[in-house]
Amino acid sequence: MDEPRGFLRRYVFSTDHKVIGIQYILTGLVMGLFGAGLAVLIRLQLGWPEVPKTLLGVWLPNGMPGGIMTPEFYLAVVTMHGTIMVFFFISYVLVSGFGNYLVPLQIGAKDMAFPLLNMLSFWVALLSAVVMLLSFLVEGGAAAAGWTAYPPLSAVASAVPGSALGQSVWLLSMALFIASFTMSGLNIVATVFSLRAPGMSMMRLPLTVWSYFIASILGVLAFPPLTAAAIMLLFDRHLGTSFFLPAGLVIGGTVLPHQGGSPLLWQHLFWFLGHPEVYVLILPALGIAADILPVFTRKPPFGYRWSVYSLIAVGALSMVVWGHHMFVSGMSPFTGEYFSLATLTITVPMAIYGVNMLGSVWGGAVRLTSPMVWSLGVIALFGSGGFGGIYLGNATADMQLHDTYFVVGHFHLMIGGVTMFGMFAGIYYWFPKMFGRLMHEGLGKAHFWATFVPFFMVFFAQHFQGLQGMPRRYYAFSTYEYLREAAAQNGVISMLAIAVVAGQFIFLANFLWSLFRGRVAGEDPWQATTLEWTVPSPPPHGNFVAQPIVRRWPYDYSVDGVSHDYVPQTATASEAAVTS
Amino acid sequence: METTAHIADRWGGGTCPFDAGWKKVMMWSFIVTDGLLFAGFLGGYGYARTMATVWPDQATVFTLPFIAAMTFVLISSSATMASAVWSARHNQRAAAVRYVWLTLAGAVLFLGMQAYEWTHLINEGATLSSNPWGDPLFGAYFFVTTGFHGSHVLIGAIVLLVLGINLARGRTTTENVEMAGLYWHFVDLVWVFIFTCYYLL
Amino acid sequence: MTEHADVGLKTYWVTWGILLGLTLVMVGLDQAPMSRQLFVVLMLAAMLVKATLIAGTFMHLRVERVAFVLMVVVGLFVNSLILFGLIVPDAFRILEMNQVTP
C-alpha cells in the first residue's frame, strides 16, 4: 500500500482506518465534554432550583437570567444533552471510532473496503458535530423538543424558542450524521463480508467484530425511515405541509392552518430507528467487554457460539419492538400488546449473553487490570439496568412508569453505563495498540471507582424517584406536594452526578500523561490472541506485512499441554505444539 | 446444489462469500438503505391515506395514459441499461456506450415529463399545503415523494453522463457499468411502487 | 471481479415486454368495475411481480448467491413490511375514532 507523506495526508486527511478511528474517538471525547457540561447544568437546576448560580447567569444571560434557569432553556439543555451524548459521544467514540479502528485489524485486512468513503464519513461526521454545536448560537437557542423531537412541539416555530431556528439546525445536523453513519456502516458491513483473511471464518471472528457487524447492519437498516421523517418534519416546519400536524392546533391563541397529519406517525418513524439505535450503541460495548474478559481470566469465553446467536437474535428482535416507547401515546392497545410480548422476548438472548459473560469470569485466573475492572463494571450495570427494562417492557406497568425517572434511570444505566464503561474498557485496553504506550494502571482503577460508585448511586436512586411518580423533563418540582419526598433526593443525586463528571478528569489526566510518559507497550502487552496483537504498536499503514493466515478461533487461552497460556490466531499447529 | 463444504469454503475468509466483490456488496447495501428511505415515505403515505376519511380520486386528478407513458420510458431505460451492462461484459464497448446514451435519453425524457406533470398540477392549484381535490396531505405526499424520486433520477442522469464519457474514452471498468446499472434499476424499482401506490391505488 | 452466470440479452427484452404488458393491464384494470379490496390486491400483486422481475432479471438477483438475495430481501422487503404492518393498524384506529359521532 502506498505510504502517505506529509503531516496533513498522514494525520489529518488520511484514508487509513486507524487514523480515522482515532479522529472519531477524539471528536467524540470532546463532544462528550460538552454533553457532560450540559448534564451538570441539568443537575444544578434539579438539585438547587431556587439558588441563583450567578456566574452561570453571567455566561448564559438568555438561558439563566439572574442565575435562575428558565424552563425553556432547561428543555433545550435536556434535548441537547441527550442528542449529543447519544449521537456525538457514544456513537462517535464507541461505534464509529473503535469500529473503524478495530474491524480491519481483527479480521486481518489492510484497511476498510472503501477507505476514501471512510474518510468522507469522518469529515461529514465532524461537520455534523460542529453544526449541532452551532445550534446553541442561533436565535431562539438550541432545539428544545427532546432528543426525540416530537411534533407538534418540534414542528411549530412558536411553540418553544428552540423550535424557531434551533430545531432546523438540529435536523440539518442529524441529516449529516445519518449520512456519515450510513457511509461508515456500509463500509463495516462490506468489509466484514468481503475482506476477512483466509481462515477467518465467521465463527472465528472475535465477539467484538460480531457486535460491530450486527450493529452496523442494524444502523443501516433502521436509519432511513427516520431520514424520511426528518425531511417531512422540515417540510412541516418551513413549507406548510401537515405530515405530523393535525387540525385544530392552537398556539398562543392562534389556530394553526394545518390539518390531516398525525404526530403519532412521527413517533412510529422515530422509534423505528430509536430503538435499534440503542442496540447499535450497546452491542459494541458488550462485544468489547466479552472480548476483554478472556484476556484477563486466561480462559475462553463461556458459550461463544450462543453469545453469537444471542447477538444476532437481539439485533433481529430490536427491529420489531419500537412500540414499547409508545405505550401511552394513543397507539392501538392491540399493537401495544404485541410490542410488549416482543420486548420481553429480548430478555432471553440478553440474559443468555449476560450469563455467558458471568460464566467467562467464573473459575478464571483473574487479573484485575484497568480494562478488566471496567469490563466487570459493564456486567454489573448490564444486569442491574436490564432489570428495569423488564418492568418497562410490560405495557401495563409502563402506564405508570412512562416518562418518569424510572425510564431515565434505566436508560442511563444502559446507555450511560454499559456503553460508557465498555468504551472506557476499550480505551484502556487498546490505548497501547493505538499509541504504543500503556495507560497508568493506578489512575485507571481510580477513574473506575470514582465513576462507578457515584454513577450507580445516581441512576439506581432515580428508579425509586420514578416509582414515586417523578416525571422527566420537568424543570422543577416545588409545586407538587406529592413529589416533595422524591424531589428531596435531588440535591444528593446532583452532588453525586457532579462527582461522576469530576472523576472524568482523572481519565483526561491519565490519557494525556500516558501519551508521552506511559510505559512502552510493545506488540502484545496483554498477551492476547487476536490479530491486532501480532503487529507493532502502533501498527503501520497497511497493518500486516503479509496477509495473515488464520488457523484458529480467538480464544485459545490455557490450552491443555501448550507451553504458553495463549495461542495467537495465526499460530500454526506446530507453533502451538505440546512441549514437554 | 452446493455442498456444506463448499459453503464453508466461501465463508471461511479470504474471499467474499457471495462471489460478489466488495463494490457490489456495498452498492446493494446502499440500495437497501435508500429503498428503506422510500419505504419511510410510502409508509407515511399509507398511514395518511388509511387515516383520511376522503382522498382525491387519482383518475380525475392525473392523466393516466401520460403516467403510463412515463412508466414506459423508465422501464425501457432500464432495459437499455441492462443491455449496456451486457455489452460491457461481452467487451462490446461501442454498443455499451450507445446503450448508456439511450438510457440517459430516457432519464432526461422522464425528468421532462415529470416536470411537465408537476407544472400542470401546480397550475391547477396543487401546493404542499392545499389542493382543489381535498385532503392537503395528497399534494404534500405527492410532491415530496415524486420530488425525492425525481432527484434520484437526476443524480442517475449525471452518473450516466459521467459513465458514458468515461466508457467512450475507455477509462472505466465493466464493474462500474454494472454498479451504475444497479443504481439505475433501483430508481426504476422505486417508480414501480410509487406508480402503483400514488397513481393507481 | 468474480465472474458469475449471466442473464442473456434476449431475456432482458422479454422482461421489458412483460413489464410493459403488466403496466398496460394495471392501467386498464383501473377503469374496470370491481370491489375496492379486489382492486387493491390485484394492483399490489402486479406491483410485486414487476418488482421481482426488475430485481431478478435486470439487477441479476436470480443468478446471485441465495444468501445474498436473502440479505437484500430481508433487509429491504421484510423490514419494510414490518414497518408498514405495525404502523398501519394505528391509522385504522384513528380513522375509526374520527368516524364515531360524539
Image (cartoon, coloured by chain):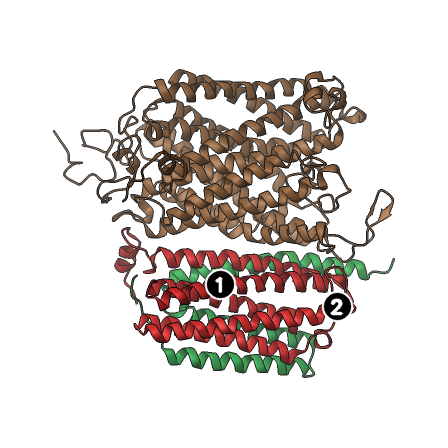
Residue A286 percent across, percent down from the top left: 45, 36
A566 vs A82, left or right, is left
Say which of B155 and C40 sits in front. Answer: B155
A210 vs C44, left or right, is left
Look at the image and tell me in which quarter the N terminus of chain A lies: top left
Image height of A383 relative to A106, above or below:
above
Mark 2 is surrounded, within 10 Å at the Cα level, by few (under 14), some (14 to 19) or many (20 or more) other residues, namely some
On the image, numbered disc 1 is attached to which residue? Answer: B158
Residue A416 percent across, percent down from the top left: 54, 31
Where residue A387 sits, quadrant-wise, is top right
Earlier sequence position, callout 2 versus callout 1? 2
Residue at horizontal 33 percent and vertical 72 percent from the top: B93
Residue C88 percent across, percent down from the top left: 66, 59
Q: Which chain is brown?
A: A
Where residue A18 sits, quadrant-wise, is top left
Q: As shown in the figure, which amino acid type bears the numbered disc 2?
A: Trp
Image height of B155 relative to A338, above or below:
below
Label drawn at residue A16:
none
Q: Secondary structure at mark 2?
A: loop
Residue at horizontal 72 percent and vertical 36 percent from the top: A140
Q: Secondary structure at mark 1?
A: helix
Q: As shown in the figure, which amino acid type bears the numbered disc 1?
A: Ile
Residue at horizontal 43 percent and vertical 35 percent from the top: A23
For chain C, the rendered hue is green
On the image, numbered disc 2 is attached to which residue? Answer: B55
For chain B, the rendered hue is red
Residue B8 percent across, percent down from the top left: 28, 55
Mark 1 is surrounded, within 10 Å at the Cα level, by few (under 14), some (14 to 19) or many (20 or more) other residues, namely some
Image height of B177 relative to C27, above or below:
above
Residue at horizontal 62 percent and vertical 48 percent from the top: A270
Q: Numbered disc 2: what chain?
A: B
